[in-house]
């Protein structure tokens, strides 16, 4: 009986193991790369859906926009070979590269660009970024139904695309000039109200980037393969992007199962100990911060906001929680774009107490600090913040919330403090207005802490209307100083992107965070 | 038997309906908005509020819960479990592509745990209160008490990190697929799942064997001169299987729960991963679809356990 049992077991094992594997890939070339995805992708690979980190990582192999962003946060020509800004910063003319083809061989022209931008600006198409396009001339009329086309988007010939803004807006290009372009010949047949449901976004088979889509096996991998029609064909033939937990990824980095992976500061020693793995570190584009709800009168006083900054030893947080792999932030502006001479709000509990006393802070008041649990650094930081605020006489209760609950607290303006992070303020400083402008106070925009400073708004809009680089920088510097003085947000730190790369992979340039896409994967190669 | 089956099925269907109502209501009552959470604070722009309202309306989430339930029920009865709120794919498709790996993991895990539990249980029963018996008691206690994810992480540390014997994530290496590769990926998760469930079966097998070995017919067989081997394997074991089989069948829910945890630890692409991510993202349709599937499975397995009981033990008559 035992023999039969064992035999049956063996057969069952073989049968079942055989079913679950895929059919062997044809060719089986040795040139393949395994990349770690820090989360399961939503599975919507297109520019319409809300931005999702792992989906962005996949899309950076498949799609390109007129411009791209390199790891130093500079705009680089992609589908456009150059662009010009008019002297009044309202008109942006893009010269498209000639002779480009989609992965199915069809030619790429300005028609694709026009089609894509019209779709992205149309709220009815389910575009999550439609709000960014209201700055383009003619969008308001189009959305209201007064026009069937958008006057501010023009394609005068196959190789030219023009964007016209409603008012001087130098930073507009950094907002919408990087949007991924869709193939008009595949999608234009679908009415825009139904476009989001189109299966193309589950399996984008026609692409213009360095790779084309092969398949997405949920919870296993996304498989992309080199696009032969790309203007400089990729050197690595097949790339597999695999979602898994960070523990599993670090283990796989060690044994060669994964070639490129981001990792957290807690794994620094482990990854340093791996043979055949080198590490790269890159400054992040966004930053972790605490929003103080200024709809509540006790946070409307700037002295309270400044006191909270003085009360927290942010240098210590960076040293202990992030092993030094982060920068303390002094404003919303990216470090490279910030002027020198900003108030550092260095750790000074005595000063914090003094300011709180001046502002008349009620020592019996208990306030809530809410955040979405799950990221080690933020979990640790909340506790430290609670302790250090308690040391200056502020009672803080920690509240874990689910990501889905948090937006209600923004709507009701019921929260006290929210710890969160992200954003990208590094490409162009104009993006800072989305979190500081009076007109962007939630729900009208991303200014969830209800901050409003007309002086700052004025400086920001004047800067954004200035074409001359030096003058613009000077205005932004003044804006940064004003914002730093007003302490609109509790800026904590900007974590660096930490990446482990197996030595055989050449040409990889680490991005600053794990949810921005990869830059120029066509230039990567595998040695030996 | 026939009447019994019909009655049981009718009860099961009723329980099943009540489960769907309860889950639907609970899931929709959970605080938070799955659409709003897709746009975190740092991504908000001036059109976000409108986008969220549009999406909620398009997905029917602004209707009263019982209206939503009615639409869901009428579609579900026709085999349409709705679409994922996250990416619009049909729920049946999402479940279908993941059920295979989970069943594979559960089956192999079950086989492994029985392969360990049977010999050890029999050994413990035959040598009661000996070193072997106490040893297996420790094993079963460990298996039941040590959290399965801990065993999993330990296994990854030893087998993948320290000694690089086996892969620790995924079901296949897409660049080098094949039977050996599939087996290598299956080993760690299945063994860990097996170890985690061994304890439960071990205790039942031991207890059941002890009861049988103390029975009159065993003494008769021994008196007739049957070898100990024959007595144990040909007589006692078969009879001791009765309660064990029912434990196995009704433990399926536990096995599935263990598989869910294992799938997270080993990045195994089964239903468990789908369940966890859909709960985290409040993807209502998928959560309900998954809960439905589990409810059906557990109800079916319990029914199977009862039927099996009467098949295996002629003394039992179902009323």
Image: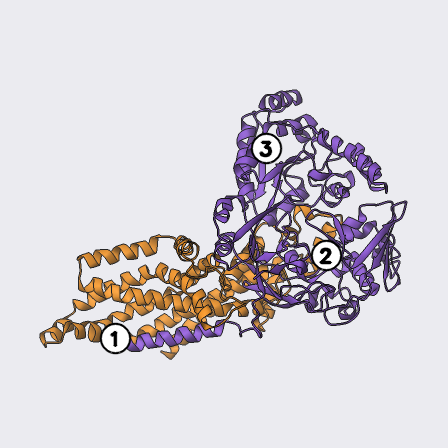
Chain colours: A purple, B orange
Residue identified by numbered label 1 = B315
Judge whether residue B247 can be spotted in this image. Answer: no
Looking at the rendering, in which quadrant would you find the C terminus of chain A?
A: bottom right
- In front of the other: label 3 or label 2? 3
Chain letter behind tag 2: B
Secondary structure beneath dot 3 equals helix
Real-space Cα separation, disc 3 to disc 2, in angstroms = 41 Å
Mark nearer the N terminus (2 vs 1)? 2
Q: Identify the disc placed on residue B54.
A: 2
Mark closer to the observer (3, 1): 3
* Residue bearing mark 3: A314
Q: Position of residue A153 (x, y in %)?
A: 86, 57
In the displayed structure, A312 sits above or below A33; it is above
Let me know if marks 3 and 1 both belong to one chain.
no
Which mark, by number, is residue B222? none
In-front residue for pair B131/A493 = A493
Q: Position of residue B243 (x, y in %)?
A: 29, 68
């Amino acid at each position: 009986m035992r023999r039969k049992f064992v035999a049956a077991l063996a057969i069952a094992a073989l049968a079942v193991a055989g079913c679950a594997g895929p059919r062997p890939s044809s060719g089986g070339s040795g040139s393949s790369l395994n990349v770690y995805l820090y989360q399961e992708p939503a599975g919507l690979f297109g520019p319409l859906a809300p931005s999702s980190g792992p989906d962005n990582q996949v899309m950076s192999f498949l799609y390109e926009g007129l411009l791209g962003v390199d790891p130093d946060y500079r705009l680089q020509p992609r589908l456009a070979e150059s662009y010009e800004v008019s002297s009044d910063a309202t008109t942006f003319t893009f010269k498209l590269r000639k002779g480009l083809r989609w992965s199915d061989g069809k030619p790429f022209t300005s028609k694709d660009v026009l089609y894509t931008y019209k779709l992205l600006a149309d709220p009815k198409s389910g575009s999550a970024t439609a709000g960014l396009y209201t700055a383009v001339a003619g969008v308001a009329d189009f959305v209201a139904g007064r026009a069937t086309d958008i006057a501010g988007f023009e394609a005068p010939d196959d190789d030219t695309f023009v964007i016209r803004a409603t008012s001087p807006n130098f930073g507009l290009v950094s907002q919408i000039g990087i949007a991924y372009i869709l193939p008009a010949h595949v999608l234009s047949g679908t009415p825009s109200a139904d476009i989001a449901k189109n299966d193309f976004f589950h399996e984008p088979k026609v692409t213009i980037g360095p790779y084309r889509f092969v398949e997405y096996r949920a919870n296993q991998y996304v498989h992309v393969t080199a696009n032969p029609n790309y203007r400089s064909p990729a050197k690595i033939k097949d790339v597999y992007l695999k979602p898994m937990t960070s523990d599993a990824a670090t283990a796989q980095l060690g044994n060669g199962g994964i070639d490129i992976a981001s990792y957290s500061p807690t794994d620094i020693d482990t990854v340093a100990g791996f043979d055949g793995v080198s590490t790269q570190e890159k400054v992040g584009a966004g930053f972790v911060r605490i929003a103080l709800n200024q709809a509540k009168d006790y946070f409307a006083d700037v002295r309270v906001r400044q006191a909270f900054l003085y009360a927290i030893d942010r240098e210590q947080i960076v040293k202990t929680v992030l092993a030094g792999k982060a920068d303390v932030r002094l404003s919303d502006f990216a470090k490279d774009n910030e002027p020198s001479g900003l108030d550092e709000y260095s750790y000074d509990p005595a000063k914090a107490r003094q300011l709180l006393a001046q502002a008349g802070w009620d020592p019996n008041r208990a306030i809530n600090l809410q955040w979405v649990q799950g990221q080690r650094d933020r979990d640790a930081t909340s506790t430290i913040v609670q302790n250090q605020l308690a040391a200056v006489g502020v009672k803080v209760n920690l509240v874990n919330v689910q990501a889905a609950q948090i937006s209600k607290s923004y709507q009701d303006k019921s929260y006290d403090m929210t710890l969160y992070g992200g954003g990208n303020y590094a490409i162009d400083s104009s993006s800072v207005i989305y979190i500081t402008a009076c007109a962007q106070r939630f729900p009208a925009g991303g200014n969830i802490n209800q901050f409003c400073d007309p002086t700052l708004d004025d400086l920001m809009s004047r800067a954004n209307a200035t074409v001359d680089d030096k003058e613009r920088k000077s205005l932004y510097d003044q804006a940064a100083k004003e914002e730093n003085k007003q302490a609109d947000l509790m800026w904590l730190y900007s974590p660096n992107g930490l990446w482990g790369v197996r030595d055989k992979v050449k040409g990889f340039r680490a991005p600053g965070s794990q949810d921005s896409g990869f830059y120029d994967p066509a230039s990567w190669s595998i040695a030996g | 038997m026939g009447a019994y089956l019909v009655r049981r099925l009718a009860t099961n269907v009723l329980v099943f309906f009540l489960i769907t109502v309860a889950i639907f209501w609970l899931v929709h009552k959970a605080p938070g908005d799955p659409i709003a959470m897709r746009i975190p604070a740092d991504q908000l722009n001036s059109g976000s509020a409108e986008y969220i309202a549009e999406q909620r309306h398009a997905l029917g989430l602004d209707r009263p819960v019982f209206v939503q339930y009615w639409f869901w029920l009428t579609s579900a009865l026709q085999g349409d479990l709705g679409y994922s709120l996250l990416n619009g794919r049909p729920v049946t498709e999402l479940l279908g592509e993941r059920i295979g790996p989970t069943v594979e993991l559960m089956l192999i895990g079950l086989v492994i745990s029985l392969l360990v539990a049977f010999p050890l249980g029999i050994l413990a029963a035959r040598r009661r209160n000996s070193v072997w018996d106490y040893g297996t008691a420790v094993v079963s206690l460990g298996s039941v008490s040590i959290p399965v994810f801990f065993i999993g992480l330990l296994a990854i540390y030893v087998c993948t990190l320290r000694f690089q014997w086996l892969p620790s994530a995924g079901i296949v290496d897409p660049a080098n697929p094949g039977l050996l590769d599939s087996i290598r990926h299956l080993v760690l998760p299945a063994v860990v799942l097996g170890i985690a469930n061994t304890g439960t079966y071990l205790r039942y097998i031991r207890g059941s064997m002890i009861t049988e070995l103390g029975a009159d017919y065993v003494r008769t067989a021994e008196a007739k001169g049957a070898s100990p081997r024959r007595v144990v394997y040909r007589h006692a074991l078969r009879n001791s299987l009765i309660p064990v089989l029912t434990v196995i069948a009704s433990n399926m829910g536990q096995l599935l729960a263990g598989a869910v945890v294992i799938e997270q630890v080993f990045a195994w692409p089964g239903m468990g991963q789908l369940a966890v991510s859909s709960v985290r993202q409040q993807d209502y349709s998928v959560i309900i679809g998954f809960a439905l599937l589990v409810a059906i499975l557990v109800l079916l397995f319990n029914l199977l356990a009862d039927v099996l009981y009467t098949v295996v033990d002629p003394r039992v008559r179902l009323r």
